[in-house]
Image: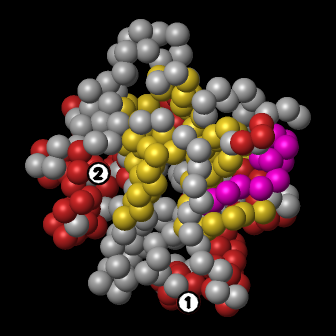
Amino acid sequence: MSQFRIFNGALQIFDVDHGQCALLTMPGPLASNRYVLIDCGHAVDFRGGPWYPGKHLQQMGIKYIDMLVCTNFDEDHMSGLCDLNNCGITIGCILGNPSVSPNTIAKLKSEDGMGNGIKELASMLAARQAIGWKQEPPTIPGVGNMIWTWNPYPAFDDENNLSLVFTLDVHGFRFMFPGDMERKGWKNLLDTCPAFRSVVASVDILIAPHHGRQNGIYEDMYEMYGCKPKLVVISDDYKQHATQETTQYYGRKTSGISYFRGKYDPRKVLTTRSDGPLRFSFLEGRCDVW
């Protein structure tokens, strides 16, 4: 199947279960595309059947992704990794919290058990570590900055606050994917890393931490450190937790966009639960979301 026209690039946020999966597609030299997959969740039932990132990429004719970003070492962020490998999709760099080794991943998961996706990730990282393969992010045309920020293990020993906060600038628009970072982790990053404060203050599109749950909100990030995105995106499934009722809070912290899918009603928060898959397209200095 032919790949969709991407103009100056596209960022898709897929509608997966209570997890996350996004694909950045950027045009490269010689009519080739470059790909960054941010998390690798899947959907048990999407439009009448299961959805897996590997099969999706395979149908698009993609055989190689330049980088896989793991923002969180929980299964809902990597549940589609086995399918990705089974479909023969090869991966360049794998980026996660660099202070967490494959053995530490197994240790962190020993209490709740390790799902197949995280087990696959730990195995792949261990194999790369054994041959000295440095996981260095590639240069992607059109991406001005890639910034990854993390709390160190063992100062933190829970998967959520060991999330990798992955920020990237695409044609001048700043997106932040913070995994499942919680209040305690945000506080430490902002208290101990002055450079990170300017990063959060310049975010345009924030993917809500922990799928929009209340424990992902650190109020000082917005009130003291000036985080005021144009749009917040919540990647979630049906509401499984009472703590997912955060759309009003995020709506008060965003400036909003004036156009979405042909409608001029202002929107401040989008959710995959209600709005389905989202696609950000870049063209001539604009970023449009559909």
Say which mark, if any, is on residue 201. none
Dot 2 or dot 1, earlier in sequence: 1
Say which mark, if any, is on residue 199. 2
Quarter occupied by residue 193: bottom left
Q: Is residue 35 magenta?
A: no
Compared with 272, 65 (above or below) is below
Q: Position of residue 170 (x, y in %)?
A: 49, 40
How many numbered callouts? 2
Which residue does the numbered mark 1 point to in the structure image?
103
Q: Amino acid at mark 2?
A: Val
Q: Position of residue 133 (x, y in %)?
A: 65, 80
Q: Describe the element under mark 1 as helix, strand or loop.
A: helix
Label 2: how many Cα within 10 Å (few below 14, some 14–19, many 20+): some
Image point 23% across, 51% down: which residue? 198
Compared with 263, 193 (above or below) is below
Quarter occupied by residue 247: top left
Compared with 59, 134 (above or below) is below
